[in-house]
Amino acid sequence: MTAIATPTPVRVAPLAGVLAAPLWSIVSLTQAATREGFDLTRHPLSALSNGSPGWLQIANFVVAGVLMFVGASALPGTWAPRLVRLAGVGMVAAGVFTMDAGGGFPVGTPTPTTLSWHGYGHMAAGTLTFATLIAACYVLARHLPGRAAWLARAAGTALLIGDLWAMSGAPAGSLTLAIGAIAAMACVSVVTARYRTGS
């Protein structure tokens, strides 16, 4: 009896990991360029979750987090997948717990004097995401040759510096944080693509 051939299953995990960074970055930066009153040198990308169109950035965080969590299984080693899964959980939580509005965005919103419960939740989610992404970049560098390893470390360092710069209240802190976050997420997506294609 001849066996019936079955189609090769779609490799969902690698595709999810590859898509996470470009999807989140494109959606975030497009909103940053088009939302009235938004200034990336003063407002973090998380602030896009506020206001009437905020649902789009909330969904962006949640979808990107799920893609990262699913895609983590395509990464090499033991610790890199674990760290990226935690980063994915942090992204989902950052979407669920939106940051407090303020600092002039949405337009005319004053800076709050105290954080709300969801503001604290967003800060905790951001801390989890940034810490695990930074660590993941350094761990992934151990699995990469030469220049690729240095680029992975540079991406992790960019997020570390961007986060510290933003937390210090320095000028354009939200911009440096955005650059670092996009660089670190891109590192994970690029490494996933590398292992997906076997190159």
Image (spheres, rainbow, N blue to C red):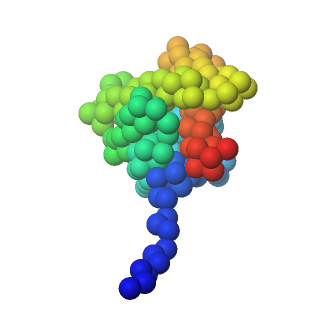
**x%, y% of residue 140?**
54, 29
Residue farthest to the bottom? Answer: 1
**Rendered residue at 43%/36% (across/down):** 81
Q: Position of residue 79 (x, y in %)?
A: 42, 29
Res. 124 image quadrant = top left
From what the image shows, is residue 34 above or below residue 77? below
Q: Is residue 126 found left or right of 147 in the rendered image?
A: left
Count of numbered circles on the image:
0
Give residue 48's position: percent from left, percent from top: 50, 45
Residue 88 rendering spot, x and y as whole percentages: 41, 41
For residue 47, say whether it is visible.
no
Residue in the foreground of this view, choosing between 55 and 66: 66
Q: Nearer the viewer, residue 80 or 3?
A: 3
Which quadrant, please, contains the N terminus? bottom left
- Residue at 58 percent of width and 49 percent of height: 196
- The image quarter containing residue 174 is top right
- Tell me which corner region of the image, top left, top right, bottom left or bottom right, holds residue 144: top right
Instruction: Please state if 48 lies on the left or on the right of 62 as rendered.
Output: right
Residue for point 46% across, 66% down: 9
What residue do we see at 41% from left, 31% from top?
78
State whether residue 129 is above or below residue 29. above
Q: Is residue 77 visible?
A: yes
- In this view of the protein, which residue sits in the foreground, 84 or 90? 84
Pick the quarter of the image with the C terminus.
top right
